[in-house]
Amino acid sequence: MSSKDNQDNTAFPGGNWSEWTEKDLETLDHVSRNLMQASLKSQKLMSEVVAKALEGDPVLPQADPFHSAPEFGEVWTQIISQPELVMQAQADLMKGYLDLWSNTTKRVVTGDEAAAIKPEAGDKRWRSKDWSENPVFDAIKQSYLLNQHFLMGLVHGVDGIDEKTKRKVEFLTKQMTDALAPTNFALTNPDVIRETMQSRGENLTRGLKNLMADLEKGRGRLALTQTDMEGFKVGEDLATTAGEVVFENDIIELIQYAPTTDTVKKRPLLIAPPWINKFYILDLREKNSMIRWLTQQGFTVFLISWVNPGPELKDKTFEDYMHDGLLAAIDAVEEATGETSVNTVGYCVGGTLLASTLAYLEATGQPERIASATFFAAQTDFELAGDLLIFIDEEWMKEIERLMDAQGGVLDGRTMADTFNLLRSNDLVWSFTINNYLLGRQPQAFDLLYWNADQTRMPKALHLWYLDNMYRKNRLSKGELSFGEVPLELDAVKTPIYMQASRDDHIAPYPSVYKGAKRFGGPVRYMMAGSGHIAGVINHPDANKYQHWTNDELPDTVDDWIVGAVEHPGSWWLDWREWLYERSGEDVPARNPGDGKLNPIRPAPGRNVLVRSDDSKSKT
């Protein structure tokens, strides 16, 4: 009798189990059946991945995607050659372990609590009470933190390394030490141990199924699920502010939103969001929609909805996005309203485009077309652009180009998502790894994470040019860029500027935004909000969250600006509204889409925003 016949419904049988059928699986208990199904799926999927790798599939992850081996070798060679640095780091580590041993022993005997090292404020990995109340897990936590501090201290303290190389190795060392945190392993995470005991291991079975589903979704690349992607539908749950698409071409739809007041300000407001993300971060839900709020303040609001490009648009350039995007939208706003001058907003890379357009209009004698410019978390000087600078060295640029060539001339949304997730890996990678794969839970529906996962693609010509000229060479800030024969000089721009930055922004750090604010030649109001790249911008006044700082002066350094700044509770939107009112003219009767020369084409949110990068299909 075979081992298959001898199975007792509590364990997997021996033999060639890869040949089991669904009928065979039905003889197992629930937990074992799930685990066997996941194992069979895993075997099949891994076979496909290996086959792709042997065939040289260019989309699969590379062994060293950051091409960091030379930098690591250089840094650690220097560390070894500096005995004073190593000896001091080892002494600090030894002292830390002696304190940890002494404190742990004292705690077990007397109950007194003392820590050799504490997590950084805001580190959410240690929220479980066991990490502080259980002496064993507290010791595990502190041991990990001591080791991490030891490694990071060596890299940070080494001399003789250029700042760019050190920054890259520091970032990647932090990524590796974060990956090795005890929270990320089943046997050293108290929440996972508790769940495993209570569910008799079913959490790990569910977790394996979740892992296989994410690998299958990514076709061999891990496509980490952060939220229930069936929990929302754009146009029904999100991006629901009423309006009409009144203009379109091959790269934009222009949405004119319906008024909610009897009168509106004479000068219309045009918003250029980033094309790296979908625009509906500005129109998530009614309670936090900036678009809806702006209409309620009496503005005629227009918004550019960028195309989610396919290979047919791979040759579109940054200059194309100016002429056929922002400038075409300004032309269309004039046709729709009869106004020859608009207030504008540029968010993130949309702000970089707006700054370039301001310089172009100034150089071509048309500065009056834009009456004011507001920048949300946007950079025009990239010298202090933070950790994203790690991703634009020569080797990484070659890797990005290789990926785009393999994908038909566009950079897929998953690559962009992975890059931004790495900047906050503990919150956006490891927390979901624990939840999905170790605890075996399904992510909940969350509007912000749904938007974060609904990524867009990048045209090759545009993206490579942007990374090279902005991030690598900082040519806009230096006055070294031209569109055709037209030089782009920011210091020639006299248009009034409102420059928003966020204190905890990891994509557009506030010192970087401040450097950009100093580049313009006209009046600039710089304002810093609490929180980060998204929550620092999208902070409805009714939420009564965070704070913001204002300073009417613009001194030489951001540190001097902070010294003279005044803190205000709550949203900065009200401060911006008053600034906009001063530049928006008198009240006129409300404008409805279609009142002017442009007829409505389709209802908001249009169709560009409905195109998903994971299926390339429009959900109209």
Image: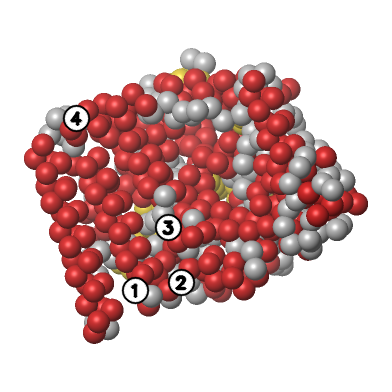
- Where, quadrant-wise, is the C terminus in this rendering? top right
Q: Which coloring applies here?
A: secondary structure
Task: Report the disc number at residue 68.
Answer: none
Give the mark toward the camera: 4 or 3.
3
Circle 2 sits on which residue? Answer: 128
Residue reaching furthest left? 84
Q: In this view, does 328 lie above or below 468?
A: below
Q: Which of marks 4 and 1 is in front?
A: 1
Relative side of 512 to 269, left or right: left
Tell me which amino acid carries mark 1.
Pro
Q: Where is residue 252 in the image (x, y as percent from the top left)?
A: 70, 36
Q: Mark 1 points at which residue?
A: 135
Q: Mark 4 points at which residue?
A: 78
| Dot 3: element | helix
Q: Distance between the residues labelled 4 and 1?
A: 38 Å
Query: Do labels 4 and 3 touch, CB within 8 Å?
Result: no
Identity, as a three-letter code, of the amino acid under mark 2? Ser
In the image, taking residue 265 as reference, residue 520 lies left or right, namely left
Tell me the amino acid under the disc marked 3: Pro
